[in-house]
Image: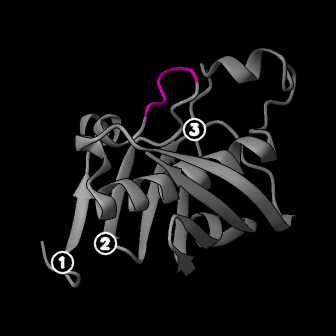
Amino acid sequence: MSADERINLDINEIKDCLPHRYPMLLIDRIEDLRLGESAIGVKNVTANEHIFQGHFPTKPILPGVMIVEAMGQTAGVVVSKTMCLEKNNGLVYFMSMDNVRFRKLVEPGDVLRLHVAKDRRRENVWRFNGKAYVNEALVAEATFTAMLVI
């Protein structure tokens, strides 16, 4: 694969990249993955997700921390595919989250699009900027750092 190639991944290919499984696997599809640079994660928010049993039963909204986690998982796929981690069981761990802002509510029926882009990389530490959208509306944003552990 060339660095300019844009890759799309289905749920099974995502599972090859990440150790997460239900109920913590939060992305359904990856679009426009550019190795070492960026990707768009897609999460279809459905009413029957376990989190809505308690958050909140009469007005279900996706918790902001779950949105940031979904951004992190999208970035984890970027790192995994770039470094070929699916072949050597490497893991990507959050180190920090900065400038986290929640702008609008995310509810069942929404399609969350998670845009992540590498800000910088130093050896096994990657920093990303993330923005989450529903339709064209910005719902959340964050800068976060993750460490690759093999």
The dominant secondary structure in magenta is loop
Residue 45 disc label? 3
The magenta stretch is: 19-23
Label 3 and label 2: CA atoms lie apart by 26 Å
| Number of other residues with Cα within 10 Å of mark 1, as a class: few under 14, some 14 to 19, many 20 or more | few
Picture quadrant of residue 126: bottom right
Task: Using the image as rendered, state which of residue 85 and residue 34 is in the foreground.
Answer: 85
Front: mark 1 or 3: 1
Task: Using the image as rendered, state which of residue 131 and residue 89 is in the foreground.
Answer: 89
Label 1, on which residue? 5
Q: In which quadrant will I find the N terminus?
A: bottom left
**What color scheme is it?**
one colour
Task: Using the image as rendered, state which of residue 41 and residue 96 is in the foreground.
Answer: 96
Q: Give the mark nearer the N terminus: 3 vs 2.
A: 2
Circle 3 sits in a helix, a strand or a loop, which is it?
loop
Label 2, on which residue? 35
Circle 1 sits in a helix, a strand or a loop, which is it?
loop
User: Does residue 80 appear left or right of residue 41 in this picture?
Assistant: left
| Mark 3 residue type | Val
Whether residues under marks 2 and 1 lie with C-beta atoms below 8 angstroms apart, the answer is: yes
Return the x and y of residue 65 as percentages of the image width and height: 78, 44
Return the x and y of residue 25 as percentages of the image width and height: 51, 32
Circle 2 sits in a helix, a strand or a loop, which is it?
loop
